[in-house]
Image (cartoon, rainbow, N blue to C red):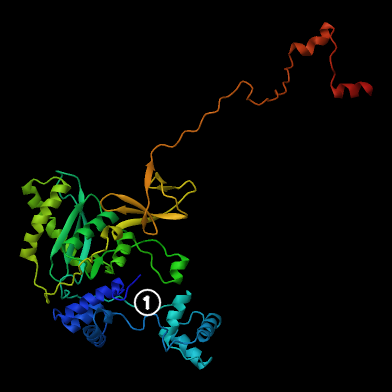
Amino acid sequence: MVGKDIIAMTQEELKRLHVIRKALDKSITQVQAASIIGICLRQAQRIIRTVRAIGDQGIINRSRGRISNRALPDKIKTRALKLYKERYSGFGPTLATEKLFEIDKIKLNDETLRLWLAKDGVSYKKRRKRSHREWRQRKACFGQMIQMDGSHHDWFEGRGPKCVLMGYIDDATGRPFGKFYPYEGTIPAMGSFKSYIKEYGIPVSVYLDKHTTYKSTKKPSIEDELNNIEPLSQFGRTLGELKVNVIYANSPQAKGRIERLFNTFQDRLIKEMRLKGINTIKEANKFLKLYLPVYSKRFSVQPANNTDLHRPLLTGINLDKILCVKTARALRNDYTIAHNAKLYQIQDSLSAKEVIVEERVDGSMLITYKNRSLKFNEITTKPQKEKKVKSEYSQAFRPRGIHTPPKDHPWRNRVLQGYPVMRRKEEVLAGAL
């Protein structure tokens, strides 16, 4: 229960408060704070005045939980949607609002109708805009945006196994960070991001490509389409829980800074590791801790603003609980679940249809239900069923098949020996005639 002296905030409000505090300390300007948060200057100035006057709770919108005074009655919404489906199907929101006002005398804003249609799951034809590309300036502050990617390469030049460098580079300063892993996947992405947070803090945004690790290829379900929810990958869910803005690049050139860093590392870093005789991933990660600060000191640039926008990790937040692969598994009647071709026995008694399996970056695994850890053990061998002993009379009786003797069988010649022989029905009828 939240007490009187405790202010309940979302991660989004905590991120906004962090930037507003930087503006109050005059580490950044109010214009920069508004740009980072994504609001106009006047709104940022209003929030700064409120926080300065009443403290951190001024970041919370006072209209939270209240119905808008300008909200339209539900009967107007119901009538407008009904008319749209029956008469104006396929119309765009702008044209539909014009016709609703001209013909049906219903005055609406086109954005209001668009939101109603999206919430109700009604589709309409949209005009595609032509893509526009232009040169982008660096971000102003350290931690405002980082570019992240994985580089597949023979980093040990045949002396060791092929591996992937999970690399990071700050957009404002060009300061690099990285860690080697055997492959590029969800666990390496989470593990490297955890190391980055411990080193610098939580960044404002991350620039990624559309690799399946970062962007889900799953098609949205009907419920997702109705709620306007896009399916997320496990790593995308992690960034969402940490309230880190995710930006997906449509081309490698869009995140050219990290691509050029990999080209440099595939030349300079490989030769440095060759001189040191590094042949394993463990040795390479240990070497990176010494090499990256030297590289950053030589090649990084001075940002336009010296403010660090990385958010510190708050006490009480379990980072391992967020940076993990969460999978829902059905709980069977015998309190067992199947996961990754293995069977696990739940030892706690609970009434649930499914539980959550959490795979941590350190290789451990937890099974939880409503954020409560459950005791379990792996079933390595299944119990053998007792074999039934067959008795000599256990086999069911089967009648013998009818055997027809061949033409030259002695049985057919018994008449020659004086034995009576049964005649066929056809012969009897022929004799009677």
Residue ID for mark 1 = 128
Can residue 7 be seen here? The reply is yes
Q: Indicate the position of residue 166 as horizontal and vertical percent values.
A: 21, 57
- Residue at image coords 50%, 93%: 102
Single out the residue that lies furthest toward the right.
433
> Regarding mark 1 in the picture, which secondary structure is present there?
loop
Task: Give coordinates of residue 114: x percent, y percent.
Answer: 43, 81
Name above or below for residue 433 compared with residue 117: above
Looking at the image, which residue is at 9% across and 50% down? 273
From the top left corner, tell me how far across and down residue 357 is, in percent.
37, 53
Q: Nearer the viewer, residue 259 or 422?
A: 259
Q: Position of residue 349 (x, y in %)?
A: 44, 50
Question: How many neighbours does mark 1 have within 10 angstroms: few (below 14), some (14-19), or many (20 or more)?
Answer: few
Residue at (7% x, 52% y) in the render: 272
For the C terminus, the quadrant is top right
Q: Judge whether 107 appears above or below 81 on screen.
A: below
